[in-house]
Amino acid sequence: MDHIRNIVILTGAGISAESGLRTFRAEDGLWEDCRVEDVATPQAFRRDPELVQRFYDERRINVMAAEPNAAHHALARLDAEWKGKLLIVTQNIDDLHERAGARRVLHMHGEALSAWCTACDARHRWTGPLRDAPPCPACGAAALRPDIVWFGEMPYRMDEIYRALGVADLFVSIGTSGAVYPAAGFVQEARSHRVRTLELNLERSQGSQWFDETRLGPASELVPRWVEEILAA
């Protein structure tokens, strides 16, 4: 591993599941309670904004109650000690990477603790409810929505992600299902640049065949072990 200098890491719901945050597709997942079409599309928000706001108000409460686990702390250690380029791209809307201490984090699907004003385009850290239509702190309009990328919307900072993949030496996917694009296609993008690829997951993802290596087990065990390995090398 002495040739590895630049690393891109993709994290999904599996890394936060051990912190008590439910995944979307498990039998007890979020979508067992609500249909995607009812809470996670722009059309749903136009049709029933109160339902959508209540759904994400609950997500916000759950995120604030959760704590980073050993996998989050291991990646924060890597962030602090790695001298090359490092980008942690997370599909998760929680802030557990940051609370563990990681700084080089990109939230491609938005953040639960952020509100976006569709009137003035301002974004604000937000820990309270949105269902009562509070005014935007910047412009006063009652136009705040969850700062979440819904189905049918473009994920954030895609150009930055692809630039990082283009100069990476190693791409690591942690706790992802490999079912949601464009993130599910990052491994193929990495391979097109001859980047080494590694999957750390509880079970093989839908795109597992694209990885050079797959290691199976809980993220809280696999990630600290891998971080120790790569820092030692």
Image (cartoon, helix red, strand yellow):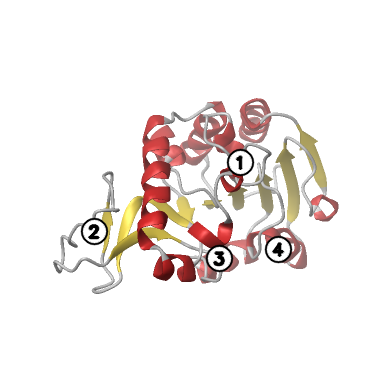
Q: Mark 2: few, some, or many residues within 10 Å (few <14, many ≥20)? A: some
- Residue 147 in picture, x, y percent from top left: 38, 59
Q: Earlier in the sequence, mark 3 or mark 1?
A: 1
Relative side of 233 to 211, left or right: left
Which amino acid type corresponds to the residue marked 1 in the rendered image?
A: Gly
Asked if the residue at tag 3 contacts the one at tag 4, i.e. Cβ–Cβ closer than 8 Å, the answer is no
How far apart marks 2 and 3 lie (CA) works out to 22 Å
Q: Is residue 119 above or below residue 179?
A: below
Which amino acid type corresponds to the residue marked 4 in the rendered image?
A: Gly
Identify which residue is drawn at 70% across, 48% down: 177
- Residue 131 in picture, x, y percent from top left: 29, 53
Q: Nearer the viewer, residue 118 or 111?
A: 118
Asked if the residue at tag 3 contacts the one at tag 2, i.e. Cβ–Cβ closer than 8 Å, the answer is no
Quadrant where the N terminus sits is top right
Asked if the residue at tag 2 contacts the one at tag 1, i.e. Cβ–Cβ closer than 8 Å, the answer is no
- Residue 164 in picture, x, y percent from top left: 57, 62
Q: What label does residue 134 carry, if any?
A: none
Q: Earlier in the sequence, mark 4 or mark 3?
A: 3
Quadrant where the C terminus sits is top right
Q: What label does residue 185 carry, if any?
A: 4
> Looking at the image, which residue sits at the far right?
209
How far apart marks 3 and 1 lie (CA) works out to 17 Å
How far apart marks 4 and 1 lie (CA) works out to 23 Å
Q: Earlier in the sequence, mark 2 or mark 3?
A: 2
Q: Nearer the viewer, residue 231 or 64?
A: 64
Q: Mark 4: few, some, or many residues within 10 Å (few <14, many ≥20)? A: some
Q: Which residue is mark 2?
A: 133
